[in-house]
Amino acid sequence: MPSTRDIRRRIKSVKSTAQITKAMQMVASSKMLKAQQGAINFRPFAAMSAELMSHLTQDTDDYRHPLMETREVRRRAVVLIGTDKGLCGALNANLFREAARYAPATTRFIAVGKKAAQFIARTRRTLVAEFSCRDTPTYGECQAISKFAQDLFLKGEVDAVDVLYTRFISTLSQQPDQRAFLPMGSALNLPAEGAASPGLRAGEPKRYHFLFEPDPATVLDRLVLYFLDFRVAQLLLEAKASEHSARMVAMKNATDNADQLIKHLTLEYNKLRQANITKELLEISSAAMALE
């Protein structure tokens, strides 16, 4: 049975841990609000840019950009967007479970985040590049990831590129998701994160028409790279919002559990202390009666 000294030491240790998790919860909460706002604000822009590119590709049926070339998929690249740090609940575990579904022999991985790179190394899969990004991804970081994936596709080293990330749904809900990235036509067939374009309700027909100058093919050539860069930016923002939300919830749960443990240990300490006092009183009473 533990002594009162042992219980006091344990209470002190748990209180110290609770202070750390509480501080991490507050930091994650601050970052979470900024990341969520960034992801949500980017969705209408992503929806509009996807619709613009869809119009461009429809108006250039006689022209196909090299990044739109559809090939038989024998080798695939996957951009795996994980986290740099842990302590974010089951977020990485759920994401890596989806990544494990890809055949190792025909899949090359581009890791974003230290945890993603560690998973690829641990499972002995092929890692061709590793990137990191800030809590608010810069355009340069997004461009570097996008360009590397494009180079693999254009050189014929892979026939398709997917992005595997964690989609932000709400503070309490994040879900692993896969998005086609290259060839670009497959990416345009998928809905953007915003369900409808700005100013339109879901299912409502489009009310406007795009006019491209000098011609759609020229505009497509200039915009395709920017579109892919922004596509990466969108998914990075979603992943960051999911990461900070999951970490805030995990740290809150850890703090709550620590508080409950402190209450339990304090109760145990008080019971043991009361038992010791009662025992000492009985010993004093017994000694006094013996002297009489």
Image (cartoon, rainbow, N blue to C red):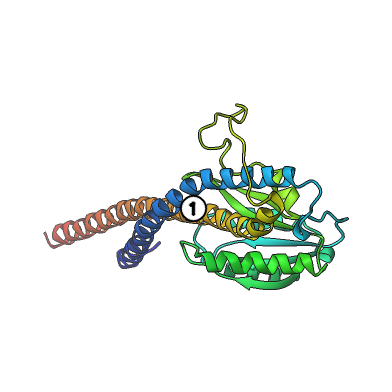
Residue at 68% in and 50% down: 215
Q: Residue furthest front?
A: 214
Q: Position of residue 250 (x, y in %)?
A: 46, 53
Residue nearest the observer in this picture, 172 or 156: 156
Task: Out of 109 and 94, give the one closest to the viewer.
Answer: 109
Q: Of helix, strand and loop, which one carries label 1?
A: helix
Q: For label 1, count other residues whose C-alpha is less than 10 Å away and answer few (under 14), some (14-19) or many (20+).
A: many
Residue tagged 1 = 241
Q: How many marks?
A: 1
Q: Quadrant of residue 66?
A: bottom right
**Left or right: 20 in relation to 201:** left
Q: Nearer the viewer, residue 71 or 135?
A: 71
Determine which quarter of the picture holds residue 279. Answer: bottom left
Dividing the image into 4 quarters, which one contains the N terminus?
bottom left
Give the percent coordinates (x, y) of residue 278: 23, 54
Residue 280 percent coordinates (x, y): 22, 60
Q: Residue at x 69, y 46 (%)?
A: 56
The residue most toward the left is: 292
101 displayed left or right of 196 = right
Question: Would residue 290 appear left or right of 104 to someone viewing this image?
Answer: left
Outermost residue to the top: 204
Residue positioned 79% across, 54% down in the render: 64
Examine the image and state in which quarter residue 219 appears. bottom right
Name the residue: 80% across, 70% down.
Answer: 155
Q: Quadrant of the C terminus?
A: bottom left
Amino acid under label 1?
A: Ala
On the image, the x and y values in percent for residue 187 come to: 70, 49
**With respect to residue 132, does 249 lie above or below?**
above
Specify whether residue 148 is in view: yes
Q: Is residue 97 visible?
A: no
